[in-house]
Image: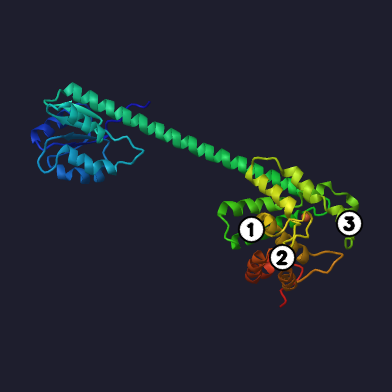
Amino acid sequence: MQDLDLTTIKLLLVDDEAHSTKLMEAILKQAGYHQITSTNDPRQAVQLYRDLQPDLLALDMRMPHMTGFDVMRDLVPLIPTDDYFPILIITGELDAPTKHKALAEGAKDFLTKPVDPTEVTLRIKNQLVTRQLHRQLHMHNEHLEAQVLVRTKMVEQTQVDLLHRLALASEYRHDVTGAHARHVGKLATLLAEARDLPPEQIELIKKAALLHDVGKIGISDSVLLKEGLYTDTDRAAMKPHTKIGWKLLSDSRAPLLQMAAEIALTHHERWDGTGFLGMKGTQIPLPGRIVTVVDAFDAMTQQCAYKETMTVMQAKAEIEREGGKQFDPDLVALFLMVIDREGNNLVSEPKPVTLVA
Ligand SMILES: [Fe+2]
């Protein structure tokens, strides 16, 4: 612990008797304190506390206008809850109940008049050392909390980085850039915001949506890399990617992975119950319903060698048509508003088309 720096410590003395404050000032100056403020009017005590922000208050009990209890009643609520502010009661004989009351209301120690200079000096020093230790502990705790925060952020960032790389690995055979996965994450965020989900849910969807197709890692090249439109056989061969994604991501206690697993499993479900698993309406978890809409929109508007790319407005009309069939109609209504607001900004780079009404 550092030594007390008596030149910077501020002491406040409140006692209606001028000879008492003068005596205390003399004792404390002799002990090395430089900044001593005293008043003989207890009504000034609270304002002086506000103005000076002292390190210690020595307070008389029996005074005209305000007793020491009155001063403490007004002053103690101003002391920050995480601060240790010593109030020393300096008075004549005190009975036990009065002492107990003073301690309960914020007093930290007592000095009896007539004061003994050595006792005054030692008791005040003890209180100031306690205050200093309290402050050091408080600073140390703040430092630790800041460190924990930094480390937690690093762990979270590592988790997100790993998930990005997992998404990239799963898309790598047919989309080296990972643009589709990233773009679905962006669109899902816009739709989740339009749905007014809580910020922490939006943040989870933003990251979890990237992994919606992670199960494609288990689909054979002959199907995944096929150029041209899928046949029914190809579509059947693609089906397991939802369950594979679920298997890869489930059984984690991390909320992000739990949501990612749910999205991977349900992003090919249809509102009318004719999807891969036959889940219907609100049986399909909301994050899955959100990704279904935006995944379809991105597939429609993405440049592709073997199928015609839709304009944003064509895709909008298609999404609208499928409301209540493939898609949750409420989400469709919200996504149409997002499309009207964002226009071509919703299309993956490079923009394949211009907005045509
Ligand atoms: Fe998929």
- Front: mark 1 or 3: 3
> In the rendered structure, are the residues bearing label 1 and label 3 in contact, judged by CB atoms less than 8 Å apart?
no
Give the mark nearest the N terminus, 3 or 2.
Answer: 3
Q: Is residue 12 above or below residue 238?
A: above
Give the residue displayed 72% in from the left and 44% down from the top.
Answer: 249
Q: Mark 1 points at which residue?
A: 189
> In the rendered structure, are the residues bearing label 3 and label 2 in contact, judged by CB atoms less than 8 Å apart?
no
Q: In this view, does 225 lie above or below 114?
A: below
Identify which residue, 278 or 226, lies in the foreground. 278
Q: Name the residue under label 3.
A: 234
- Front: mark 2 or 1: 1
Quadrant of residue 287 in the image? bottom right
Identify which residue, 70 or 24, lies in the foreground. 70
Label 3 sits on a secondary structure element that is helix
Q: Is residue 173 above or below residue 59?
A: below
One can see residue 206 in this view: yes
One can see residue 224 in this view: no
Quadrant of residue 28 in the image? top left
Q: Name the residue under label 2.
A: 347
Q: Is residue 306 left or right of residue 39?
A: right
Quadrant of residue 90 in the image? top left
Q: Position of residue 119 (x, y in %)?
A: 19, 22
Q: Does the closest atom of ligand 1 sit within 8 Å of the Cβ of label 3? A: no
Q: How far apart are marks 1 and 3 (CA)?
A: 30 Å
Q: Where is residue 214 in the image (x, y as percent from the top left)?
A: 76, 49
Label 2 sits on a secondary structure element that is loop
Q: Distance between the residues labelled 2 and 1?
A: 14 Å
